Image (tube, rainbow, N blue to C red):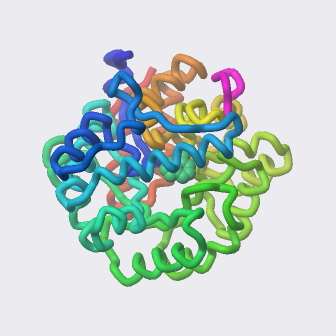
Amino acid sequence: MPLNDRLLALPKVDLHVHLEGTITPAMAQKLAARNGLAHAPELLAADGESFRWEADDTAAGALVGFLKAYDAATGVMKTAQDYSDITYDYLKRAAAEGCIYAELTISADHGQQVGLTYPQMLDAITKGFDKAKAESGIEIRMISTAVRHYGPAEALKVGRITHDNPHPLVTAFGLAGDENAYTMADFEPAYAAAALPYRTAHAGEASGPSTVRSAREVLKVRRFGHMVRAIEDADVMAEQKAINAVPEVCVSSNMALGVYKTYAEHPLRKFFDAGLKVTLGSDDPTFFGTSIGREYQIAQEHFGFTDAELLQVSRNAIEEAFVDEATRAKLLRRIDAYTAD
Ligand code: ADE
Ligand code: ZN
């Protein structure tokens, strides 16, 4: 559904988006052809316009099934040009919907599966970004992210590679993948090795409130990928509120992966009304049939967010973005320039 003119003009921020999760089915087919690959037909739905994956009925099972498809889709990428193209393609689409800033979750492990070293992957992403920025002014930073189910030893390697190859746009370290694999403590060495100023971690998505607590206590994060299942424990909610926690909420992702069956069950509105510093993310937009514009639209249509409240969500995101203060101030000015109702 197209965004109305006011919503289109409203400055948006996508703090939670996995780069390989932005490949469109059309791009996947284009890259498969370009790279001489038989594009796994089981990856695409019958209409050829969306991805499909096997999932059981539980949130944990759905995530694992989805992550397999995610890895398979990455399999159509083979070159640095492919990384540049998906980066440009995503940023162009996001900017056209009024996105002024995105934080790309990037994965050295996936880059390696494509056949690129971490510096080669960063260089390719930066080329795609430079082109998009020249056209639209969109700004980005990157979160170098370890994949939980690849294990703590692999995560430590990602932490070290991140540390040994500093890049001005890589400002944070993160943790994604199967939330039920290993413990948060197993990944602290990876964060320590990366030694970046900012941290985030997926928690409270496929697993319950206790992962949120341990992400906070063990990894010392204040920004959380998802965090929605914190709602199941009043004590965890109070603890999160006490640190002014920042949830990166991805509604369509949660629906697609069966964390919630209906919008009415989703805690987005409860989080906002509880005074949590809510931000929005598209997570893996092309897999979940969404975009950052659509996430703002869903917040408005299904959760009653006014334009002023959506602008507050964007302001929250820039205030908590993993950027230097000069860039933050510049982005806040773009938000202030929009007059809400
Ligand atoms: N990797 C890509 N998307 C993810 C998600 N929604 N949760 C955990 N890991 C992911
Ligand atoms: Zn995610």
Quadrant of residue 14 in the image? top left
Residue 292 visible in the shown view? no
User: Within the magenta stretch, is there residue 262?
Assistant: yes
Q: With respect to residue 242, does 298 lie above or below?
A: above
Q: Is residue 68 left or right of residue 236?
A: left
Residue 319 visible in the shown view? yes
136 vs 84, nearest the viewer: 84
Q: Is residue 66 left or right of residue 30?
A: right
Image coordinates of residue 11 in percent, x first then y, are 36, 35
Specify the quadrant that holds the C terminus. Answer: top left
Image coordinates of residue 103 in percent, x first then y, are 40, 53
Specify the quadrant that holds the N terminus. Answer: top left
Q: In this view, does 101 lie to the left or right of 273?
A: left
Image coordinates of residue 79 in percent, x first then y, are 21, 60
* Magenta residues (range): 259-265
Q: Residue at x 69, y 34 (%)?
A: 57
Image coordinates of residue 143 in percent, x first then y, are 43, 62
- The count of marks equals 0
Q: With respect to residue 224, does 284 lie above or below?
A: above
User: Within the magenta stretch, is there residue 282?
Assistant: no
Q: Which residue is drawn at 69% across and 21% down?
A: 264
Q: Residue at x 34, y 53 (%)?
A: 75
Q: With respect to residue 144, does 15 lie above or below?
A: above
Q: In this view, does 49 lie to the left or right of 14?
A: left
Q: Residue at x 33, y 57 (%)?
A: 327
